[in-house]
Amino acid sequence: MLKEPFGTGNAWFEPKERCRFMQVMVVRTLLALVTVFAIVIMLAVPMAKSSEAFEKIEGQDVAGKDETILLPKPDRGGSFSLTAALSGRRSCRKYTGKPLSLADAGQLLWASQGITDFKRGYRTAPSAGATYPLEMYLVARRVEELLPGVFRYQPEVHALQPVKEGDLGKALQDASFGQGPVGRGAAVFVIAAVFTRTTKVYGERGIKYVHLEAGHAAQNLCLMATALGLGSVVVGAFDDDAVLDVTGIPETEDVLYLIPVGECDHQ
């Protein structure tokens, strides 16, 4: 049987061997192409980590009403002591009407559910099994650089996602059985929960864990308000369905807390 040259150098192959060699080369080529394609896809898709996103937040302009709004970078140091915050915290039901700064609004959201460990996703408030069932909303009435409306807090990137437009203070006050602080605050922070995130791990016991976690987040927010020189009060009396309707929060979530915040009027 005649032999014919194939390949490089002094390599000589029988026809069957040449066919097998070509099959191997085709497979290797395909694998190489798949690898290159995968690398291109990885480079094309943004893979910025949350910690990197924090570094890009400071100094950026506030986005429009239909865009994600990046909040100023949270202050992780601070000079106000925890002891002073614990001593000074009081429920405040009357406010001066002074607007809340966007930085302070972001600091309060971070205090309640901000991320403190980017590698493991841990937050400022403890959570059973790190299931994190809570969702934070900002009902802005007088917040600098924000149009009045409802915004969902996105802790992974420390940002706000618009949910609903308009000054909803009066409507939210009505949904809270006419409680004045809800309508007078510069903003109302809403703590909602998706119970299934925790109950799918802990069963019925998880319901208690979610309520405990809401308390942790609320206390963090109130203490931070005190540290910022602001007043706050926790409100638990409201019509659940009415609050969902006013705020536009999905029906898959349960509202647990309303926390009006503003500069306290001590007169």
Image (cartoon, rainbow, N blue to C red):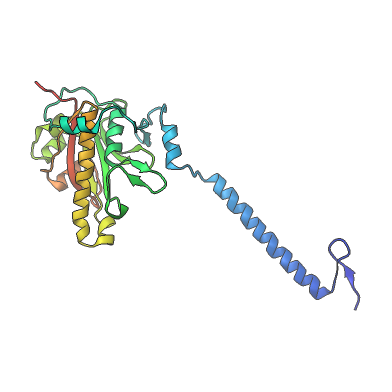
Nearer to the camera, 198 or 188:
198
Nearer to the camera, 120 or 47:
120
Nearer to the camera, 120 or 79:
79
Give the residue at x 29% y 27%: 79
Q: Position of residue 3 (x, y in %)?
A: 90, 73
Which quadrant of the view contains residue 237?
Answer: top left
Which quadrant of the view contains residue 20?
Answer: bottom right
Q: From this view, report whether residue 1 is shown above or below residue 162.
A: below
Left or right of 45 in this view: 36: right
Report if residue 164 is visible in the image.
no
Q: Position of residue 142 (x, y in %)?
A: 23, 27
Left or right of 164 in this view: 14: right
Left or right of 106 in this view: 235: left
Report if residue 142 is visible in the image.
yes
Q: From this view, report whether residue 23 is shown above or below residue 76.
A: below
What is the quadrant of the N terminus in the image? bottom right
Q: Farthest top residue?
A: 267
Give the residue at x 41% y 36%: 54
Q: Farthest bottom residue?
A: 1
Which quadrant of the view contains residue 222?
Answer: top left
What is the quadrant of the C terminus in the image? top left
Q: Position of residue 45 (x, y in %)?
A: 52, 46
Q: From this view, report whether residue 147 is shown above or below residue 121.
A: above
Q: How many numbered discs, if any?
A: 0
Give the residue at x 29% y 50%: 132
Q: From this view, report whether residue 71 is shown above or below residue 154.
A: above
